[in-house]
Structure formats: C-alpha cells, structure tokens
C-alpha cells in the first residue's frame, strides 16, 4: 500500500489543480475495459434480453416472431399439466446430487490431503472423469446400464446383489437414481479439488495449537477444519447448485426426460418445449423463470451462510 | 439454441418471400410458356438439384447423365448434388432468389405445390411412365386433385422374425393377426430365451411403431384435414400394445426402448419378432451374417386390411422450366428399368414403378418381401404443416402409456396438442 502511494506522484495526476477530475482520466479506464464490456454485453446481456423478449412474444410454429403476447406464454406454461412433476423432479435432482457430491468430495479431499504412497497418482487419476467429455462419460454409462448388453447387470448378478437383470433406465424408479448417480460421479472431481485447495490453505499452526490444547481428532475437525473450510465450501456448493440445476446432457442422453415427463427437469423441459413442441415462446418463459429461480436459491444460500458466519465470529 | 431459432426465423422469412414470388411467377408463367408443349426437337440445358443419398449417388448420376447426353444430342443436364443436411435450406434460398432448378429431388413437395411453383406431372412425364407408377406411391404426389410429386423411391416397414426362435417355439408360419401374434409371443416366452416381441415406444421413433398398430386397427393420425389421434381405434391399439407389455410378451419397459438399440439387439439374435424397415437386413448382415430370419406382412387386428408404414421421396419439376422437353426426356430416361434398377440396388431403396419393381424382384431376392408390401403402405401426415410439432410431442409422450398413464389420456393429450399447435401457425 505504501509503495503505491509513493509511486503515485510520478504518474499523471488524476485530479487537476482546481481539484476537478480530469475528463480524460475519467474515461481512460473505460477505454481499457471496453473490449470486455462489449464482449459481456454481446454474449451475456444480449441473449438474456432476447430471451425475455421472446418470452413475451408470440412465436409461431416455424420460429417467426408474430407479435406481442403479454404474459400469455407464462400462463400457458403454468397450465402445462406436467409442470408440477418437472419442478419437483428438479428440486429432488439438485438437492440429492449436490448434497451427496459434497459429502463424498469432502471425504475424498480429506483423503487426498493426507500423505500416502501413490498420492500423486490418485490425485491425477481423479482428474480423468473431469477432463473427459460429459457426453462420452454419459454414453459409456448408458451402455454399461443397458438391459441387453450392459456390464452392470452381470457384475451385480455375479456379486449376488441382484438375482435377475434390472432394466435400469426402463422405469423412472431406477432411471432417475441412475441419472443422479452419473450426475454425482461427474461432479465429484471438481468439487474435490475445490475442497482440497481449501484444506491445503488451512495453516498448520492452528492444528498444532489444537493438539497442544489436547483436542480430540473429532473436535479438531469440527472446530478447526470445518470453519476454516467455509470459503471453499461456499464456492463448491454455489457452483454445484448452478451446474446441477442447469445440467442437461446426462438426462437427455440417458432418458430424454422420459417416459413422458417422469425424469424431466426444467432444463430438459425447456428444450422439449422449444424443439419437440415447436413452442419457443413458452420455452423462453420457462428459461426466464429458471434463471430467476437459480438466482434466488443462490442468494438465499449465501445470505444464510454469511449470517451463520457472523454468528460464529 | 439461439442460432437455431435465428436460422428458423431466417428460413421462414425466405418462405414468405418465396410465397410472394410464387404469386408473381403464377401471373407471368402462362405467357412465358412455362409449360411449353414437349417435343424431342427442344434442346437446352436443364438444372437438376438432387439429394446426396450415399457414396454411390454421385457416380450414379454422372454416369446416367453422360449416357443421356450421348443419346440425346444437344440436351444437357447440369447436376447439383446437395447433402441431406443442407438441401432444404439450399432449395429455399434458390426459390427465394428466383433461381429454382428445373428438376428437384427431395422428400417433400407439397409446400411447393401449395405455393403454385410446380408443373403438373402430366406435363412433364410421358403417359406410359405415368401409368407405370405404382398407385400407392403416385397417390401421395397428389395435391387438390392434381399430381405434382413424381414418386422417386420409397422405403416400407415389414414384420421380421427370427427363424431359430420360431423353430424352438414350434411356430410354423408368421402371425397375420394381433391375436396370432400374441399367441406366438406366448409360445416364444414359454419355450425359449428370446424376447418374444421387440416393441420400440421410446422417444427415438415411437411414431413409427404406433402408426403400424394404429393403422392395423383401421386408425391413424388424420382423417382428411382433421386430426384423429384419440379416435377409438387408436386407443384400442395402444391398449393392446400395453397389454402385450404387461403380460411380459415384449422386452421390459417398451415405453423407454429406442429403435436403434432394439434393432441392434434383434440383429444379435436375441429377439423373436419385431417390426423393421428395408434397411434392417443390412444391419443384420453387419452383426450376424449367418442369422436366419423371415420377413412378412405386419400383423393387423383380425378383420382389418393388411397395411404398412411407408416413407417416400419425390422428383418435381418447377413450372419456370424453359426446357420441358428435356425434363421429360431425362425423367423418362431415368425411369427406364435398365437405369432405375441401378439406383435401387445402389441405395437399397424400393422402386416406384411397376416395370422396375418386376426386374428388381427377379434380380434381388431380398427386396421381394418389401415390394410385395409396398402397395399396402400408408404414410405419415407429413404434408400437414403442424405434423413436425405433433411428431415431437408423440415422441415425448407415447412411452408414458407404458408407465402408468392410461392410453386414452396419453392420446387425448396429443389430440389437445394439435389445437394449441394449430394456433401457432403463422
């Protein structure tokens, strides 16, 4: 800080002799920011505006915008008889996948933070499913779970867990959990690395202090590790909620949300409305509500999290 | 997603322009002699835009055109081969910019006919050839009483059965009715380890399987211009299918089984009976060349006429053509059995003329069953503007009839969807 103020006089002053901010100085930063601002507007803001506009328009069956719809797309959406199932699926999908991912990743991060022979290899191998394309990973699972030639049934049968082959993706009762399983598998690597980075950031001396105070392993974990891990945990949970909420690939490849809408989430339902039903307006309406829902969930989570942090402090 | 919508918007704008230009063309064509009387003395170069079916397509057309130009001196054909992915967009652009070809090969023609862009078939095809077309296929080329689409080639569905499964189960001949099908499936279930009947009602192409059952019960998608998805014949068909699944006479959960994996499983010799198309034999050859299988008519509900599902491609001549005589010569030349048979063999698709069907049946035994079925074909209501949106919802929802939802409510839902889709037609 002191260094910066020492260096300041040598630079062009931002304020002129009368104390007014120089016009050029005011806009210079904008000039440097312009490329990224243009980029943000073009690839983020403009599509959002277009999405909202479409949700308020009548889009005909061949995709042509033929006029102002008011809120009729939204009312039509709320009259979709499958919407309830789709929303409840989405809630279950997000809650189950995020919670199990965090719990498993926490254990894995803890393990990878310990010293053991071959640790480097294990850390590297965890990257593989993350680096592989999600489509490929999902298709591999699709094949492994296939009723006729998949490998999962013979293995489970040999081990004695099941007595006759199960058509995993055939009924919603097993298809949705199978999809959640794959969702968890592909979310674990990233989450583990975020938490591992958090664990490595905890200063050693706090643990030494705890040891000196005679804290048990469980007490140390509860009172040192978990509180120190809060920033990493916040990042891991928020990003996971967003990724999992918007996850499309796994469900689309494995069941296309079917049969009917039994395994649809809002992400796949948006797609079906637009490209199966040729109803772009209603699809845009659901997209808008999707964004709003994610924002609310994340905001609420961050607020609760911060309040608890203040309580502890 | 965004870019996709934009492309569609762009395409529909082009369509509107095309429609406007069509009206303009319509006004002037009578004086400019768009449908000039044919005569072999007419000479000139025609443009032919064709779809690229396979690696054989290009060499077939090049060879045919070379021989055509040698036989008819002064008549030239300019070939423009376009991939299936791009051809719709390409032709829309050509029409919008008044550069439509003389002859076009595509899987749809009705939109152009409705826009008054096409020459009637009687003006561009010789009377002998017109008589030669199989009636089933010629009928699909008719819009409001006039034939515009020239049947180019076709593919039909048939009933496939694994002969080993039939032998083991003691079944002598393939079933002709639903009732026999059910009894045979029960025998296969009791006596063999085969899946009795493979039923694909998953989202990939459930409309095909369901069409076969619905049509075999006297039902279907439309009656004239009216949608009849929830008619009693269709509900009864879906209920029968559902009962088959409940009795364990199909693979587990047909409502989520897709066509590709099911056909692969049949080709691996694990399924007793199934509906397939004329492309299934090549898949079987690839998986298990030694497998013994039979092909027969799709079983129908007792008392109904035999029927099957067909898909058809077309040739069409735009009425802006300046060399109708050359068009006529070229089309007639293509349909000569000695030429047309090579198209049929190369592409593995069915011929649409009686003469070539005879030759094909003699020369390629594997085509015989499909040629026999061709006259029984019925088709999707693909000329209806909202069929695309309905087919999409059919894919999404039909499977639910196998997971607790009643067939009646599934079909009523789809029938209701036709109303909301019709409201969104521009």
Image (cartoon, rainbow, N blue to C red):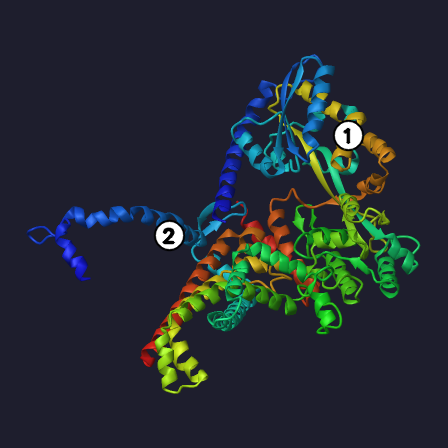
Question: The residue tagged with tag 2: helix, strand or loop?
Answer: helix
Same-subunit check for callouts 2 and 1: no
Q: Is residue B296 above or below residue B93?
A: below
| Residue B156 placement, left or right of A216 | right
Q: Can residue B352 be seen in this view?
A: no
Q: Residue at x 16, y 54 (%)?
A: A7
Q: Position of residue A146 (x, y in %)?
A: 69, 61
Residue at the far bottom in the pictured view: A214
Q: Residue at x 62, y 66 (%)?
A: A178
Within 10 angstroms of label 2, few (less than 14), some, or many (20 or more) residues? few
Q: Is residue A67 above or below residue B235?
A: above
Viewer-proximal residue, B3 or B46? B3
Residue at the far front in the pictured view: A117
Q: Mark 1 sits on what residue?
A: B342
Within 10 angstroms of label 1, few (less than 14), some, or many (20 or more) residues? some
Q: Position of residue B355 (x, y in %)?
A: 83, 30
Q: In this view, does A99 lie above or below A244?
A: below
Viewer-proximal residue, A263 or A212? A212
Viewer-proximal residue, B27 or B61? B61
| Residue B294 placement, left or right of B57 | right
Mark number, residue A45: 2
Q: Where is residue B265 in the image (x, y as percent from the top left)?
A: 76, 55
Question: The residue tagged with tag 1: helix, strand or loop?
Answer: helix
Chain containing mark 1? B
Chain containing mark 2? A
| Residue B162 placement, left or right of A67 | right
Q: How far apart are marks 2 and 1 (CA)?
A: 56 Å
Q: Residue at x 57, y 53 (%)?
A: A277
Q: Position of residue A109 (x, y in %)?
A: 48, 70
Give the image quarter of residue B358: top right
């Amino acid at each position: 800080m002191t260094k910066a103020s020492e260096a300041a006089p040598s630079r062009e002053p931002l304020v002129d002799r009368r104390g007014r901010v120089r016009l050029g100085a005011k806009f210079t930063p904008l000039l440097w920011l312009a490329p990224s601002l243009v980029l943000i507007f073009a690839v983020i803001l403009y599509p959002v505006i277009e999405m909202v506009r479409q949700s308020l328009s009548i889009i005909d069956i061949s995709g042509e915008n033929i006029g102002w719809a008011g809120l009729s797309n939204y009312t039509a959406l709320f009259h979709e008889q499958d919407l309830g199932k789709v929303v409840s699926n989405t809630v279950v999908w997000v809650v189950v996948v995020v919670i199990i991912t965090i719990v498993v990743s926490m254990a894995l991060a803890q393990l990878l933070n310990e010293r053991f022979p071959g640790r480097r290899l294990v850390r590297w191998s965890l990257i593989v499913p993350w680096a592989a394309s999600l489509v490929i990973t999902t298709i591999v699972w699709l094949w492994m779970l296939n009723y006729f030639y998949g490998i999962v049934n013979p293995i489970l049968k040999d081990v004695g867990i099941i007595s006759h082959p199960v058509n995993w993706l055939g009924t919603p009762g097993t298809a949705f959990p199978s999809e959640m399983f794959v969702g968890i598998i592909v979310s674990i690597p990233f989450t583990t690395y975020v938490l591992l980075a958090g664990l490595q950031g905890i200063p050693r001396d706090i643990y030494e202090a705890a040891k000196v105070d005679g804290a048990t392993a469980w007490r140390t974990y509860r009172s040192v590790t978990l509180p120190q891990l809060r920033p990493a945990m916040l990042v891991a949970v928020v990003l996971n909620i967003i990724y999992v909420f918007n996850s499309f690939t796994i469900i689309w490849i494995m069941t296309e949300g079917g049969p009917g809408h039994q395994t649809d989430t809002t992400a796949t339902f948006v797609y079906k409305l637009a490209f199966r039903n040729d109803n772009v307006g209603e699809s845009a309406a659901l997209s808008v509500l999707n964004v709003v829902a994610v924002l609310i969930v994340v905001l609420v989570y961050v607020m609760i999290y911060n309040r608890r942090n203040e309580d502890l402090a | 997603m965004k870019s996709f919508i934009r492309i569609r918007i762009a395409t529909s704008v082009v369509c509107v322009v095309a429609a406007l230009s069509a009206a303009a063309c319509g006004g002037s064509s009578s004086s400019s002699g768009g449908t000039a009387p044919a005569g072999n003395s007419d000479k000139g170069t025609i443009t032919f835009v064709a779809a690229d079916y396979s690696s054989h397509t290009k060499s077939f057309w090049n060879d045919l055109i070379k021989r055509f130009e040698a036989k008819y001196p002064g008549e030239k054909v300019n070939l423009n081969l376009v991939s299936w992915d791009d051809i719709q967009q390409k032709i829309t652009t050509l029409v919008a910019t008044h550069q439509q070809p003389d002859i076009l090969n595509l899987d749809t023609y009705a939109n152009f006919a409705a826009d008054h862009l096409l020459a009637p078939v009687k003006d561009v095809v010789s009377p002998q050839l017109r008589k030669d077309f199989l009636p089933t296929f010629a009928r699909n080329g008719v819009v409001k009483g006039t034939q515009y689409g020239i049947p180019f080639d076709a593919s039909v569905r048939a009933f496939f059965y694994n002969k080993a499964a039939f032998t083991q189960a003691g079944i002598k001949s393939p079933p002709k009715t639903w009732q026999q099908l059910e009894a045979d499936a029960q025998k296969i279930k009791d006596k063999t380890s085969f899946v009795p009947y493979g039923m694909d009602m998953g989202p990939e192409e459930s409309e095909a399987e369901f069409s076969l059952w619905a049509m075999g019960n006297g039902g279907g998608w439309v009656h004239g211009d009216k949608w009849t998805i929830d008619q009693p014949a269709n509900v009864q068909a879906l209920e029968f299918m559902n009962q088959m699944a409940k009795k364990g006479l199909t693979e587990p959960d047909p409502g989520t089984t897709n066509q590709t994996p099911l056909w692969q499983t049949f080709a691996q010799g694990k399924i007793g009976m199934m509906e397939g198309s004329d492309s299934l034999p090549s898949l079987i050859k690839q998986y298990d060349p030694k497998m013994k299988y039979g092909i027969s008519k799709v079983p129908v509900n007792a008392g109904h006429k035999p029927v099957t599902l067909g898909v058809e491609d077309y040739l069409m001549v735009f009425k802006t053509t300046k060399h109708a005589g050359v068009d006529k010569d070229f089309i007639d030349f293509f349909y000569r059995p000695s030429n047309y048979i090579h198209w049929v063999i190369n592409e593995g698709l069915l011929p649409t003329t009686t003469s070539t069907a005879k030759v094909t049946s003699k020369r390629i035994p594997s085509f015989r069953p499909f040629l026999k079925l061709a006259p029984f074909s019925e088709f999707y209501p693909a000329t209806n503007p909202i069929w695309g949106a309905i087919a999409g919802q059919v894919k999404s929802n039909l499977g639910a009839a196998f997971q607790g939802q009643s067939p009646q409510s599934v079909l009523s839902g789809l029938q209701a969807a036709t109303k909301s889709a019709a409201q969104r037609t521009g």
